[in-house]
Image (spheres, rainbow, N blue to C red):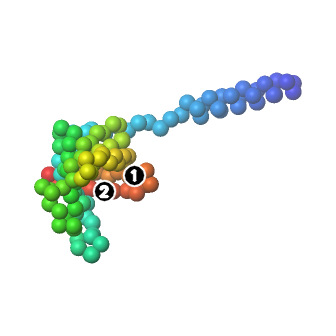
Amino acid sequence: MKTTSVFVYALVCVGVIAGFSGCSQPVTIFDEALLIGKWQRPVTASDGTPGYDCYRYDADGNGVTWDTSDDVSEAEGQPFAWTLNGATLTLLHQGEMGQTVPKVYTLTLLTTSSLAYKDDYAKSYAFTKVN
């Protein structure tokens, strides 16, 4: 009788372990077509000047970012290349010296009017589509 109890206990343990190892988070896939356009979020410069942190995502996988609180226009913005793979948004910024600076974010929301993502440090960013 004791051998049967040990066998049943072992069988239950194996089943529980197998059950948990089979669980995984579903991969969220966002429609990259919704990302195309101009996005902004309100910011304040270090001197207290209000403005917007702006991003333009183009259909060809390129874009530009600028900050109106620092008196930077879209034409003066920093170019970047972007990819969206599932929920992972990768921006490859073009540095002034020709270097590439990667920034990787996890999308949490992407609709026709709202964009939200977080970085590896759990800092969240929320944007509104303006065009």
**Depicted 22 relative to depicted 56: above or below:** above
> Sequence-wise, which precedes: disc 1 or disc 2?
1
Left-right relation of 113 to 18: left
Is residue 80 left or right of 21 when viewed as pictured? Answer: left
Q: List the residue tagged with mark 1.
A: 119
Q: Residue furthest bottom?
A: 47
Label 2 CA crowd tier, 10 Å (few <14, some 14–19, many 20+): some
Q: Residue at x 38, y 38 (%)?
A: 28
Q: Which residue is mark 2?
A: 126
User: Does residue 90 show up?
Assistant: yes
**Could you tell me the amino acid type at mark 1?**
Asp
* In front: label 1 or label 2: 1
Residue under the image location 39 percent in, 52 percent down: 119
Helix, strand or loop at mark 2: strand
Q: In the visual, does 107 lie left or right of 5?
A: left
Which of these two is toward me, 116 or 19?
116
Count of picture labels: 2
Q: Nearer the viewer, residue 56 or 100?
A: 100
Mark number displayed over residue 59: none
Can residue 110 be spotted in the picture? Answer: no
Q: Residue furthest left?
A: 75
| Element under disc 1 | loop
Amino acid type assigned to the residue bearing label 2 in the image: Ala
Q: Residues within 10 Å of mark 1 (few under 14, many from 20)?
A: some
